[in-house]
Image (tube, rainbow, N blue to C red):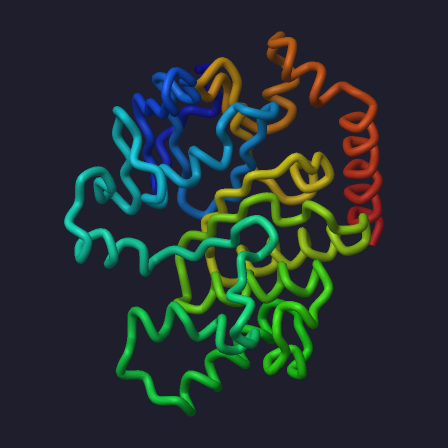
Amino acid sequence: MARLNTADHDTIIHVAGLRNAFGDQVVHDGLDLDVRRGEIIGVVGGSGTGKSVLMRSIIGLQPPQAGEVEVFGESMIGREEYEAKQVRSRWGVLFQGGALFSTLTVAENVQVPIREYYPEVDAQLLDEIAAYKVAMSGLAPEAGPKYPSELSGGMRKRAGLARALALDPQLLFLDEPTAGLDPIGAAAFDELIRSLQRTLGLTVFLITHDLDTLYAICDRVAVLADRRVIAVGTIPELLALDHPWIQEYFNGPRGRAAADAAGRATAGEAGK
């Protein structure tokens, strides 16, 4: 892996030598990645490179065949359930599509992790916390009593984000958060994530295909190819590499359009 910007930083996620395979299909082999505290890191790669599998390995849903995974300095491989649960309480996850429980309201979905980790919390406080998290996600108060089927796709993503924020996490995992959103909705969601990250001091691990998201809010980008992370760095640093997939991805028509849009946005901010 090409290591860029390798000055010492506080590492919140450390992955080393990761191997994931499904039968004869090897998805990861010798994958290494460090995520720094307080950054938004985007994870990109072609179809089948195992972006979601990597996230699932980090959060403990996909046990790897080999390798090390540490979060907050704690090993996540082979831990007792009660020990792993203490670490998991410090992160939140937004899965693709929101992954809400269809038989629960938005507010009840938000309350699920609170009930799991803090069963002693009374009903009134649960309602107050849920309402606060719903507001943080940019939803109107009337979204709380609604069911997922009554929400638009963008609203379901925000409801999923509210649930991911339920336990006041230090670390947020987002899997394709803007997929399926129109450009205006996607840009608004990006701005919400950046605002929350700055306000709450979050570290964000973000899987995306959205080049606009990468340019707008990501501090660094990790590129998956050839069963491993081939490079990590800022977009200008990645563009300096001659790997064909990186060049095709960032210098293709969509990449150039995203870069132009980011440049206009930066110029607009500077002119205020």
Comparing 45 with 47, the one in front is: 47
Asked if 208 appears above or below 186 in the picture, the reply is above
Q: Position of residue 111 (x, y in %)?
A: 44, 75
**Would residue 204 appear left or right of 186 to someone viewing this image?**
left
Asked if 56 appears above or below 88 in the picture, the reply is above
Can you say which quadrant of the picture contains the N terminus? top left
Q: Residue at x 60, y 44 (%)?
A: 176
**Would residue 183 appear left or right of 68 to someone viewing this image?**
right
Q: Position of residue 190 (x, y in %)?
A: 67, 51
Asked if 126 appears above or below 173 in the picture, the reply is below
Q: Residue at x 54, y 42 (%)?
A: 206
Comparing 10 with 114, the one in front is: 114
Q: How many marks?
A: 0
Q: Residue at x 60, y 75 (%)?
A: 135
Occupied quadrant, residue 188 = bottom right
Occupied quadrant, residue 241 = top right
Occupied quadrant, residue 221 = top right
Q: Residue at x 73, y 64 (%)?
A: 152
In the displayed orientation, state which residue is furthest to the left: 80
Can you say which quadrant of the picture contains the C terminus? bottom right
**Would residue 37 appear left or right of 117 to someone viewing this image?**
right
Q: Position of residue 212 (x, y in %)?
A: 73, 39
Q: Position of residue 249 (x, y in %)?
A: 70, 21
Asked if 43 appears above or below 119 in the picture, the reply is above
